[in-house]
Image (cartoon, rainbow, N blue to C red):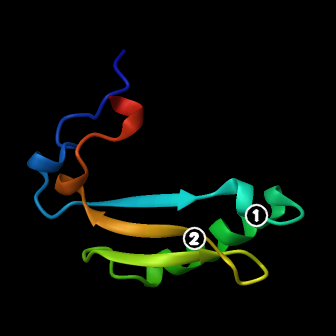
Amino acid sequence: MSAGPSRGDRPEENPGSMRLVIDLDLGLLPNDPDAELRRTLGFWTAWLPKMDLTQPAEHELRDSDHRVVGTLRLVDASEMGQPEATR
C-alpha cells in the first residue's frame, strides 16, 4: 500500500491549498528539550484555529527564554513541491 498522497491531495488538484512548515532547531532548546518542544508546539496548537489558514504567513518559534529557535510558516502548497518524506 502506497504512503503517497491520495487522490485530490496534490497541490495542483487543490488550487489555493496551503502547507504548514515547522522548522525547529532542537539543539537550541534549553534545559529540558522535551518540555520546551511540548510547550512551543502546544502554544501554536492553541493559536492555529485563530489564524487565517488561507494566507501565507511566517512566525518565529521561541523557547521559554524568548529566544528564537525556529519558524512556523504557512505557504502555498504548489510552491513547496513534494514533502521530503514522500520523495
Q: Residue at x 72, y 75 (%)?
A: 63
- Residue 14 image position (x, y, % from top left): 13, 53
Which image quadrant for residue 66?
Answer: bottom right
Which mark, by number, is residue 20? none
Which mark, by number, is residue 45? 2
Residue 16 located left or right of residue 39 = left
Residue 49 located left or right of residue 44 = left
Task: Name the amino acid, label 2.
Answer: Thr
Q: Residue at x 40, y 68 (%)?
A: 73
The residue at which mark 1 appears reads as 29
Q: Residue at x 22, y 45 (%)?
A: 81
Q: Secondary structure at mark 2?
A: helix
Which image quadrant for residue 8?
Answer: top left
Count of numbered circles in the view:
2
The quarter in which the N terminus is drawn is top left
- Residue 70 image position (x, y, % from top left): 57, 67
24 over 2 or under it: above or below = below
Whole-number angstrom distance, CA of label 1 to CA of label 2? 18 Å
Mark 2 neighbour density, 10 Å: few (under 14) some (14–19) many (20 or more): few
The quarter in which the C terminus is drawn is top left
- Residue 61 image position (x, y, % from top left): 59, 74
Q: Residue furthest top?
A: 1
Q: Secondary structure at mark 1?
A: loop
Mark nearer the N terminus (1 vs 2): 1
Q: Residue furthest right?
A: 31
Task: Name the amino acid, label 1.
Answer: Leu
